[in-house]
Amino acid sequence: MLTIQPAIADRPAVFLTIADLERLIDLLPESIPPTWPGAMLLAEEIARAHICADDDLPARVVRLGSTVRYRDLVSGRERTIQLVMPGDADIDRNRVSILSPIGAAVIGMPEEQTLVWTEPSGDRRSIQVLEVQD
C-alpha cells in the first residue's frame, strides 16, 4: 500500500524564537539518533520554521514551556500537555518531551492550526492545536 506523506510545504507555518531554536539545535543531531521517534519530524519543523525574536513571536504560538491543549484528529481525543526539554519530561504530570512525536509536532504551531504527518511506523497522525498558554 502506498503512503503519501503530506508535503512539507503544505504544512502550516511554524514559528520559533531564537532562544528556543538555540536550545533545539543543541539536541540535534549529536544527542539523538535519527531513529528516535520524533527526531525526523523535529528536524523538519526546525528547518522550515520562521525564526523571530521573542518580541516578534506571534500571539498564542507553542514554545518550550507552553501548556498546549490539542485534539488528535484520528482518535478524537483531546489532551493538555506542557512541552518540555527531554530531561524535564514526566508523562504522569503531562510534561511531554520535545523529542516525542507530539512534542515535535506542536512546537512553533499557532492555535487553531492542524499538522498531518506519517510516523516511521507508517501510522498517519493529525493533530490540531486548540489552545496555547505560556
Image (cartoon, rainbow, N blue to C red):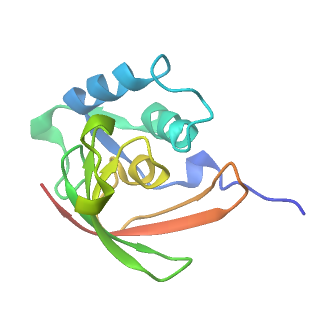
Q: Is residue 115 left or right of residue 66?
A: right
The percent position of residue 35, horizontal first and vertical second, equals 63, 34
Q: Quadrant of residue 94?
A: bottom left
Choose between 129 and 57: the one closer to the eye: 129
Q: Residue at x 57, y 37 (%)?
A: 40
Q: Is residue 41 left or right of residue 131?
A: right
The percent position of residue 110, horizontal first and vertical second, equals 30, 58
In the rendered image, the residue lying farthest to the top is: 30
| Numbered circles on residues, count | 0
In the rendered image, the residue lying farthest to the right is: 1
Choose between 3 and 75: the one closer to the eye: 75
Compared with 24, 117 (above or below) is below
Compared with 108, 20 (above or below) is above
Q: Residue at x 41, y 50 (%)?
A: 13
Q: Residue at x 23, y 27 (%)?
A: 18
For the question of whether residue 62 can be seen, the reply is no
